[in-house]
Image (cartoon, rainbow, N blue to C red):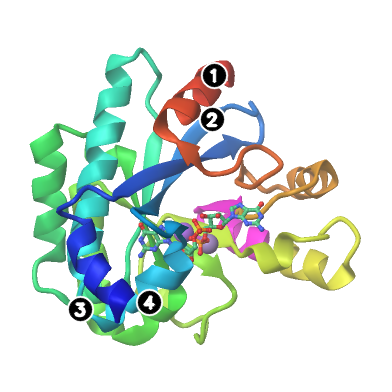
């Protein structure tokens, strides 16, 4: 409970920061986007992982407030990058199921974009398939509204949720992110190869991009690229990093 109390204060006392992990284009090997990842710099405990505090925030009814902060900070940062002379970089923001439950999430997104003057096509929202499945009719409407704004939708951790493939028919989205679980050792494991090849073929058939998460070794990247994966993310390229480090990395990798 102590941590929950601290969490309530963390937003107003400015203890959250956004870090960024680049998306790499397979062909050009350049930075084409980034995932925004929240970090909590606790005054006495040091960094607390979002894997620990996001579930806590959801249980305490704080996920919506934190999600609003993340969206705002991500849009502000991305808008400011164009002023540094960096070519347009897309920003991907993780969205928790709690945020979609609130009325008018699409209007929140619209307001945030316009407050910062960020073009909608530079924003991507990452949802898990479990979230997408939860209430497929509500989700379908919301996806339509968000995509009508020009915002892209990615399915995160693809292949690991409790879901069927039927939501792929009901919902329209823009990208599949292959979960790290299937990417690790894809160069040597037949099972991972079969799964990754199927997801890449699925993306091609649906006419959407496929990104491989958690690429840690060059051999994994080479295998994935040879089999038609267009986008990469992972420690092989870069870890999540503070904004200034990300900007330096992106400039080097233009
Ligand atoms: O960045 P890290 O590997 O520590 O992230 C751990 C978990 O926290 C991941 O599942 C990631 O999706 C989640 N996470 C990171 N940042 C955010 C965020 O801004 N919002 C939400 N809802 N989850 C996040
Ligand atoms: O659940 P989600 O996919 O949003 O989690 C994203 C998190 O995964 C990132 O914040 C990061 O800390 C972690 N991550 C990113 N790339 C790698 C990687 O190559 N290896 C491992 N082990 N974790 C990664
Ligand atoms: Na994510
Ligand atoms: Mn993921």
Does residue 121 lie above or below 189 as drawn? Answer: above
Tell me if mark 3 has few (under 14), some (14-19) or many (20+) residues whose alpha carbon lies within 10 angstroms of its own: few
- What is the count of numbered marks? 4
Query: Are the residues tagged 2 and 3 within 8 Å (C-beta)?
Result: no
Quadrant location, the N terminus: bottom left
Dividing the image into four quarters, tell me where ligand 1 lies: bottom left
**Mark 4 vs 1: CB contact within 8 A:** no
State the SS at label 4.
Answer: helix
Instruction: Name the mark on residue 61.
Output: 3
| Image location (x, y in percent) of residue 52 | 45, 71
What numbered label is drawn on residue 31?
2
Q: Is residue 207 magenta?
A: yes
First-in-chain label (4 vs 3): 4
Looking at the magenta stretch, what is its main secondary structure? helix
Circle 1 residue: 254
Give the Cα distance between marks 4 and 3.
Answer: 10 Å
């Amino acid at each position: 409970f102590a941590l929950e109390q601290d969490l309530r204060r963390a937003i107003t006392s400015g203890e959250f920061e956004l870090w960024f992990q680049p998306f790499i284009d397979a062909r050009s090997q350049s930075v084409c986007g980034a995932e925004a990842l929240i970090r909590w710099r606790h005054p006495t405990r040091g960094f607390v992982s979002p894997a620990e505090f996001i579930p806590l925030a959801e249980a305490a009814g704080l996920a919506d407030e934190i999600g609003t902060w993340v969206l705002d900070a991500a849009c502000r940062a991305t808008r400011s990058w164009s002023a540094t002379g960096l070519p347009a970089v897309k920003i991907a923001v993780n969205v928790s199921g709690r945020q979609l439950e609130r009325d008018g999430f699409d209007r929140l997104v619209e307001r945030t974009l316009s407050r910062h003057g960020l073009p909608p096509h530079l924003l991507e929202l990452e949802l898990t398939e479990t979230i997408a499945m939860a209430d497929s009719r509500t989700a379908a409407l919301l996806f339509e509204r968000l995509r009508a704004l020009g915002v892209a939708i990615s399915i995160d951790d693809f292949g690991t949720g409790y879901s069927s493939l039927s939501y792929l028919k009901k919902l329209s989205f823009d990208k599949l992110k292959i979960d790290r679980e299937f990417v690790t050792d894809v160069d040597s494991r037949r099972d991972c190869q079969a799964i990754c090849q199927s997801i890449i073929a699925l993306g091609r058939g649906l006419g959407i991009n496929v990104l491989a998460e958690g690429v840690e070794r060059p051999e994994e990247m080479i295998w994935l690229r040879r089999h038609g994966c267009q986008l990469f993310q992972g420690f092989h390229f870069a870890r999540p990093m503070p904004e200034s480090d990300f900007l330096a990395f992106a400039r080097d990798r233009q």
